[in-house]
Image: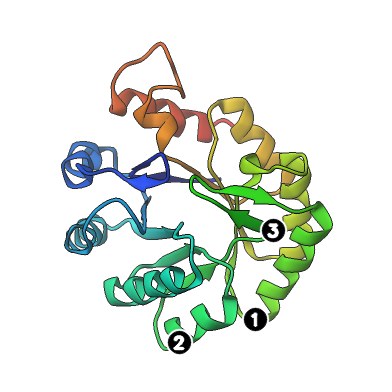
Amino acid sequence: MDFIFMLTRGDKTIEDCLAVYDQIAPLGLRHVGFKDVGVEFSTLVRLTERIRASGATSYMEVVSETPEACLRSAESARTLGIDRLLGGTDVESVRDILAGTATRYFPFPGFPSGHPTKLGGQPADVTAHCERFMAAGCAGADLLAFRATEAAPLELVRAARRGLGTGYLIVAGSITSRQRIAEVAAAGADAFTIGTAVFDGSYNPRKGSILSQLGDVIADCETV
């Protein structure tokens, strides 16, 4: 089970992401990402360079609300040389933008909307979307399971797993405990993201530092 640490809070990249990344670098995290909104592009350039220099896999998640903004974010991912681009729903257009690059794409199944993003759709929708993603050459899917408004989160995880086959399934958002990590792993997820729960201390309310929160997440991943 891969843990993807997102330098984000409230669905935006944190303004001090560079300083925070320097602080957490000694932990040796292998998967680190950010959103396409919250800071200037020049900051994302520097952040991507630092993630790459540390040997970690880089992620950018698209949460822009308009189709045009989402495609501009895909263009930014291409320019940055991001390893894995998450989110968005216009699969064909994004695949065209990423053609010829090494960036792997993981769209949103279901019907995401708003900011912070909520997820509409039933399990059958998620399965069908994931099947379409794999047929289009995507590497997997980025599922906002715990942002669901019409279905049980774990049912959506299982539905995505059915649709992806051997594709890589990321569960994004609202992972706040070891129990939840275990649940999404049992339902078929390959990875999960955490951002806000580390920065607001809700992963372990008894501890205060970012390093302590991350240490607990890492330890819990090793035991599920």
Q: Which mark is residue 99?
A: 2
> Which-is-in-front pick, marks 3 and 1?
3
**In which quadrant of the rendered image does the N terminus lie?**
top right
Question: Does dot 3 land on a helix, a strand or a loop?
Answer: loop
Q: Residue at x 30, y 51 (%)?
A: 38
Residue 95 percent coordinates (x, y): 52, 81
Question: Mark 2 packing: few (<14 Cα in 10 Å), some, or many (20+)?
Answer: few
Q: Secondary structure at mark 2?
A: loop
**What colouring style does the render use?**
rainbow
Is residue 220 placed above or below 42 in the rendered structure? Answer: above
Q: Residue sitting at 45 percent across and 22 percent down?
A: 202
User: In which image quadrant can residue 60 be found?
Assistant: bottom left
Vertical placement of 157 versus 136: above or below?
A: above
Question: Residue tagged by mark 3?
Answer: 110
Measure the C-alpha gap from mark 1 to mark 2: 12 Å
Distance of label 3 from label 2 (alpha carbons): 24 Å
Q: Nearer the viewer, residue 149 or 49?
A: 149
Instruction: Classify residue 185 by image quadrant.
Output: top right
- Nearer the viewer's eye, disc 3 or disc 2? 3
